[in-house]
Amino acid sequence: MAAVLDCFDAVGGHHPATLGSLHARFSVPLKRYFRSYRLSAADVEDLIQDVFVRLAGPAGEADLLKPEAFVFTLARNLVRDRARRLYTRAQAKSIAIEEADLSCERPTPDRCAELTQLVQQVEQALGSVRPNARKVFLLHRVDGISYAEIAMHMKISISMVEKHIMSAIIAIRGVEQYKRQRSGFTVARPDADPFACLEI
């Protein structure tokens, strides 16, 4: 209330007693009115003060005979002015939907279905080789384990590791769809390629 009366003094408007009476009468209804627009507590207080500053000025002199209508007309206009300012600021930081780059690197649902089927076919091809060959291939191409580590882990020679991997690669190359899909499938990032680990 003191801040409001200070504003009244600054603008040199109505007698503080009259404005104090208006403040006591309308401050709570105005608070409810502004809160109905889901404004923050600080914005509500600022707008209430703006209403009474306008009432204190020359423009409010003739309208205080019907204060209720004038007070809420002021309040409505202040809310509209605020909305217009916010809209103008938002426009400056916005772009038209036509200008937005909404491209997506993820495959389409149809492409996902094709890739799922392709993975199943590659798994079938690997299932046709000897278990040790499949295991060696997956350890190297999927888990990233070196030939020497695989040889040591499985107690076989490095040359045998190479033979196992080659037999798995030959089986995968036999998948006709795999060869066709790989020739036409490109991705923006290597880590987005579900077959990067099967590069042959």
Image (spheres, helix red, strand yellow):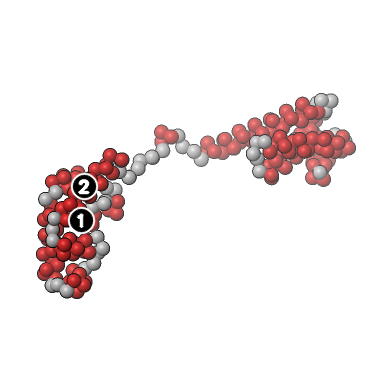
Q: Quadrant of residue 90?
A: top right
Q: Position of residue 174 (x, y in %)?
A: 11, 50
Q: Residues within 10 Å of mark 1 (few under 14, many from 20)?
A: some
Element type where label 1 sits in the image: helix
Q: Using residue 139 as the reference point, say whether residue 44 is left or right of it.
A: right
Q: Residues within 10 Å of mark 2 (few under 14, many from 20)?
A: some
Q: Using residue 30 as the reference point, say whether residue 166 is left or right of it.
A: left
- Please state which of residues 1 and 61 is positioned toward the viewer in this rendering: 1
Q: Position of residue 153 (x, y in %)?
A: 21, 72
Q: Amino acid at mark 1?
A: Leu
Q: Position of residue 32 (x, y in %)?
A: 72, 37
Quote the CA–CA distance across marks 2 and 1: 12 Å
The disc placed on residue 118 is 2
- Please state which of residues 83 and 157 is positioned toward the viewer in this rendering: 157
The disc placed on residue 198 is 1
Q: Could you tell me which residue is drawn at 29 percent across and 54 percent down?
A: 191
Q: Position of residue 5 (x, y in %)?
A: 82, 42
Q: Quadrant of residue 22?
A: top right
**Of label 2 and label 1, which has the lower sequence position?**
2
Q: Is residue 166 above or below residue 180?
A: below
Q: Could you tell me which residue is drawn at 83 percent across and 38 percent down?
A: 24
- Please state which of residues 27 and 135 is positioned toward the viewer in this rendering: 135
